[in-house]
Amino acid sequence: MPENFKNFIAGEWVAPTTGAYFENRNPADWNEVIGCFPRSGPDDVTRAVAAAQRGFARWSQAPAPIRGDVLHRVGDLLVQRKDEIARAMTREMGKVLAETRGDVQEGIDTAYYAHTEGRRLFGRTVPSELRNKWAMSYRRPIGVAGLITPFNFPLAIPTWKMFPALLCGNAVIFKPAEDVPLTAHLLVEVLLEAGLPPDVVQLVHGEGSVVGRAIVEHPDISVISFTGSTETGSSIGATCGRMHKRLSLEMGGKNAMIVMDDADLDLALEGVLWGAFGTTGQRCTATSRLIVHANVHDRFVQLLCDRADKLRLGPGLEETTEVGPLINEDARKKVEYYVGVGEEEGARRLIGGARPSDKRLERGWFYRPTVLAGVRPGMRVEQEEIFGPVLAVIKVDSLTDAIRVNNDVRYGLSSSLYTRDVNAAFRAMTELDNGITYVNAPTIGAEAHLPFGGVKQTGNGHREGGWEVYDFYSETKVVYVDFSGRLQRAQIDTEA
């Protein structure tokens, strides 16, 4: 019988009040049940909030450098358990071991970076406009933060949200995606082993429509951070706006890699293979559009198809595997649907567009890497996020056309340009309407010490990672100290 896992609420591993569970299965072999996890309800969230408020009262009083020391120990433990967690992640999420090891490494990097920020929660001391008066600001914690995370980076994205929130002195309620509950369980184990006070973190498993909604709508959760679809993010945004909650949204992408006619085509080829088909295309930063200059279009697309058609599909735990399965059946159906839409719109399927014929892969949600050529701006496969191993190729005649095509979508997360022309590179850096632009590198690959996020319908202006996220999880307080011994009425009494 598969193991029944529990929520972590009020310092204990507890069964859900609903008494209901859901199965966590291996997407490479749907017959394998990894475990059963709580199908929690609103009452579980209510209990978690009460515990988190107690945790916040204690944790917010700990000096920030001490909070940072706890996160440093978290990083050390993640180093020790890196391979174990990576293997567990591959079993429940599907991506290859090299990628899940990288996922854990992002968590390690984020922990160590958060540790240093414990001594860098800077305020400002500024000159007052009045005599004998001191003016300053400092950062202080907000309260309880609700963190709702996706399946594709089961450890990295939760740490992007959780570690800065904790460093700033908040308590957190963590709701992982239903597809990856085991990695979330292991992360909370690490936090507790590192010495985080138990009430400071609550883990509540369950469906987004139930548990996620209860977190978003709870009046005592002051901060919400969500990564997922634009449609769900829009709904969350409406609720948080009405309830005056602080909200960070990281949502969809339709990222383009531009290859100019002076590009290093061998380098660009490696970039597009990794950008389009790494994580089986299930990244918000995945390269889902390839914009190629007409002078090199045919040659480059042929090179791409020759290589992509040979990528090895299989279970992510096998070292020879290059592309793992999609996360679940619905994800594969969505990919199949969009490939059909592309062909109906006039795109040409050059490779892929089908399930693999290998019988040993029949029990998994595998789909062959797919290249669609002859895609025109405005086609649905050029405009809409597919979240799978499907690459739409668009031919252009100039950098001006390439920039226009890149910008003419509702998303604005990541972009990429391959060129040897420094002037073109700097022009693209300025004119590509994205939160992130890579030059001579693919559209994926965030670093823990830099802000991550996008514009337009990709986000709502906040960033994950880097220094900016610490502003999101803390509040600015301004303090004036008047030691003049008399009433000074600011601008009314300002003297030259």
Image (cartoon, rainbow, N blue to C red):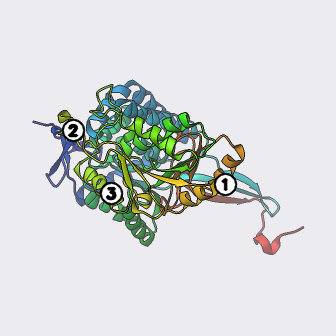
Asked if one can make out residue 97 in the rendered structure from this viewpoint, the answer is: yes
The residue to which callout 1 is attached is: 430
Q: In which quarter of the image is residue 338?
A: bottom left
First along the sequence among labels 2 and 3: 3
Whether residues under marks 2 and 3 lie with C-beta atoms below 8 angstroms apart, the answer is no
Going 31% across and 62% down the picture, which residue do you hit? 213
Q: Residue 350 carries which label?
A: none
Residue 14 lies left or right of residue 308; in this view the side is: left
- The amino acid type found where label 1 is placed reads Thr
- Secondary structure beneath dot 1 equals helix
Q: Which mark is residue 338?
A: 3
Residue mark closest to the camera, 2 vs 3: 2
Going 58% across and 47% down the picture, which residue do you hit? 295
In the rendered image, residue 159, in percent from the top left (x then y), is placed at 43, 42
In the rendered image, residue 253, in percent from the top left (x then y), is placed at 45, 55
Judge whether 260 appears above or below 480 on screen: above
- The amino acid type found where label 3 is placed reads Tyr
Going 45% across and 40% down the picture, which residue do you hit? 302
In the rendered image, residue 258, in percent from the top left (x then y), is placed at 55, 48
Going 44% across and 27% down the picture, which residue do you hit? 76
The residue to which callout 2 is attached is: 357
Judge whether 137 appears above or below 302 on screen: below
